[in-house]
Image (cartoon, rainbow, N blue to C red):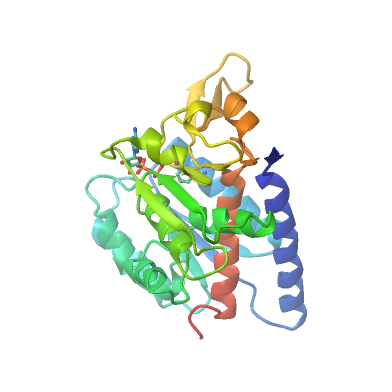
Amino acid sequence: MILIDGNKISAEIKEEIALEVQQMKKRGEKTPHLVAIIVGHDGASETYVGHKEKSCKQVGFDSTVLRFEDTVTEKELLETVDKLNNDPAIDGFIMQLPLPKHISEQKVIEAIDPKKDVDGFHPINLGRIVIGLPAYVSATPAGIIELFKRYKIETSGKNVVVIGRSNIVGKPISILLSQKANPGDATVTLTHSRTKNLKDIVSKADIVIAALGQPEFLTAEMLKEGAVVIDVGITRIKSENTKSGWKLIGDVKFDEVSKKASFITPVPGGVGPMTIVSLLQNTLKAAKGEIYPK
Ligand code: NAD
């Protein structure tokens, strides 16, 4: 069994990005600039935005966090989006979700200029992925694709089973792996809460991507010997053995599944660290005009 080390790969990618940013600066080019908008004081959102800010600093990006109280109106937020869309100093920006109930997330996301939508949530970016055009791929699926590349995991002709059909993970990773591409060219089955005979379907998979948010859902008895297992799930549970008083567990029963899998991502330290790195990669692409020429 090979443990897929997301911490190691993400550190390598950060070094690569940092080197590229140094060279851009030497050539007198503009420093990539990412803006994160955060509304309210949700603990998990604060943590994510904090990580993103720190990662930007590590690779030499400029980064700005715009904070709003949860009393902000939809109109004010849309005006901010409009300003950022039209500010040439900003290469990309993200709206940390969730937003308060009185604000339509969809409306705000659709207001973001797809050219600056480095989270890849805008329907235009998702639509471009569907028809195989260059686009910002949302961070988690992009991170999974990067892990397949770096670990040289063959996907062509393989049976892939994705568990969970969210717009940010399940659906885009299913589309990406079924594209004529490398990684890609797989036969993908997208499963969800209404799927019948999930165990049967999973038992035929060469690659399983668990993204349903149910701790330790995937067990060894469900899996084919030698399958590749990607665990996207993150659930916080209380723990007496950690300083913080909680720990993260995935959607895979790691102890038993790791004995049967050929490759497996741990939680934490697998897909999670790749997510932030993908956001950095998208911001670099935005600064260079790689997806949408400037
Ligand atoms: P979600 O929570 O929006 O949806 C869950 C999906 O799982 C739904 O499509 C549902 O149909 C499916 N599902 C639920 N129970 C099921 C069952 N018993 N059998 C089959 N399918 C079932 O999905 P999400 O936002 O992609 O989040 C999924 C998990 O991934 C969560 O734990 C989340 O915290 C985690 N996540 C991790 C990262 C990361 O960076 N590692 C990023 C995004 C999400």
Relative vertical location of residue 75 with respect to residue 211 in this rendering, above or below? below
Where residue 130 sits in the image (x, y, percent)?
Answer: 37, 69
Q: Who is closer to the viewer here, 269 or 73? A: 269
Where residue 249 sits in the image (x, y, percent)?
Answer: 53, 29
Q: Residue furthest left?
A: 102
Residue drawn at (44%, 77%), measured in percent from left and top?
A: 133
Residue 211 in sight in this render: yes
Left or right: 134 as drawn, with respect to 5:
left
- Counting the numbered discs, the total is 0
Ligand 1, by image quadrant, is: top left
Q: Who is closer to the viewer here, 269 or 208? A: 208
Residue 251 in sight in this render: no
Where residue 139 sits in the image (x, y, percent)?
Answer: 50, 56
Residue drawn at (54%, 80%), measured in percent from left and top?
A: 289
Where residue 85 sits in the image (x, y, percent)?
Answer: 40, 74
Left or right: 162 as drawn, with respect to 243:
left
Residue drawn at (53%, 47%), measured in percent from left and top?
A: 207
Left or right: 94 as drawn, with respect to 112:
right
Relative vertical location of residue 132 with respect to residue 187 in this rendering, above or below? below
Left or right: 62 as drawn, with respect to 204:
right
